[in-house]
Amino acid sequence: MNPARRIAHLDMDAFFASVELLSYPQLRGQPVVVGGRNVPAPISDANGVLSCTRLGQYAGRGVVTTSTYEARALGVFSGMGLMQSAKLAPDAILLPANFEAYRHYSALFKSAVADIAPCVEDRGIDEIYIDLSDIDEPSESLGRKIKQAVMDATGLTCSMGITPNKLLSKISSDLDKPNGLTILEISDLQTRIWPLAAKKINGIGPKANEKLASLGIHTIGELAAAPIELLAEHFGNTTGWWMHQASNGMDDRPVITESTPKSISRETTFERDLHARQDRAILGERFTNLCNRLAQDLARKGFACKTIGIKLKFADFQSVTRDLSLTEPIFEANAIRHAAGQCVKRVSLERRIRLLGVRASSLVPLSEVQTHQVPLQPTLPF
């Protein structure tokens, strides 16, 4: 491991919820949940008093997009069903998601960071890795400068971890949330990292964590002390070796400043299960809307695709996928709708449908594709 490496992981604090609080500052300090479908925006009366939807009033299949730290203290976290969350925090305020605003503030904070440290790896709408190795400034002052630049550009706080590698920085950025700055060296591994739960290592999911627990391994330190042979026996040679390396703070992955996504997708879960014949009009409308939004995503990111796929999840939660490889790349909405329709025709539609998704893969830069495509009559599977 190169001792001169300094890698930062920057994670915006409760990003979606924090963006919403810029519009509704009077909600600060309260349990706020973002998510759901058709949730009305708060209405302010003449005295500036907000009328908001409460979580306990929501009925539907929506999930929590994010929540403030006050809501998290009540057990409400992203990915939970809203109906389940309502049992924990019925009086929490429920706000609709505004993804256009989130993308705007995401671009602002990333631009602010790049002005100080240009070697940035985009990891999503609310997090980045930054290579600070070539910047001649102490980590403490550099970290605070970056955090202040993010605040100045967005009005939002972030948390950072600065360590010799990406793995440790990812863990460290979560240690002092919100608005934290954690700086660790390899010498801090034993005192700061090893006491943490094994699942704090990015890549150890619930199933792997459960299997580790069955082996008596609960902390990162216990994982580091486990024989490689034991880990290989239960997880395979590759994963076992990776677990040993990660738990000992070893990670040589570089910060990658440019990457091509493998796929771009859009999907929607319906408020109620829909039938292909009885609800054909609704399904057709939603299907077309997904294809239109996918075409917009491709255009915004500068790609066309040579493979279109669909995903259906039925009322019994069983899923099927179908893909169609194309002779020429496509990017326009009607061409995507036509190809996706061909995929749907290969699925038996006797069961009611819970979720519908469309995916574009085998991506190619739009600059390499003819800018005009012959219009196709969309296939109508519903």
Image (cartoon, rainbow, N blue to C red):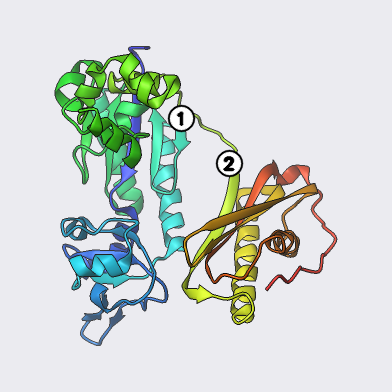
Q: Identify whether 179 is placed above or below 288.
A: above
Read off the residue under disc 1.
Answer: 119
Residue 285 in the image: state x and y as whole percent.
62, 75
- Given residues 86 and 249, the one toward you in this image is 86
Residue 194 numbered tag: none
Q: Identify whether 25 is placed above or below 58.
A: above
Query: In terms of image quadrants, where is residue 73?
Result: bottom left
- Mark 2: secondary structure: loop
**Residue at horizontal 46%, vertical 30%?**
119
Crowdedness near tag 2: few (<14), some (14–19) or many (≥20) residues, C-alpha within 10 Å: few
Q: Mark 2 or mark 1: which comes first in sequence?
A: 1
- Given residues 5 and 108, the one toward you in this image is 5
Identity of the amino acid at label 1? Cys
* Furthest-top residue in this view: 2
- Given residues 132 and 304, the one toward you in this image is 304
Q: Between tags 2 and 1, which lies in front?
A: 2
Residue 38 in the image: state x and y as whole percent.
42, 76
Residue 17 in the image: state x and y as whole percent.
30, 60
Identity of the amino acid at label 2? Pro
Q: Are marks 2 and 1 in contact (CB under 8 Å)?
A: no
29 to the left or right of 300: left
Report the label total: 2
Crowdedness near tag 1: few (<14), some (14–19) or many (≥20) residues, C-alpha within 10 Å: some
- Mark 1: secondary structure: loop
Query: In terms of image quadrants, where is residue 192?
Result: top left
326 to the left or right of 46: right
* Furthest-bottom residue in this view: 46
298 to the left or right of 93: right
Instruction: Let me know if residue 136 appears in the view.
Output: no
User: How far separated are the C-alphas under marks 2 and 1?
Assistant: 19 Å
Read off the residue under disc 2.
Answer: 261
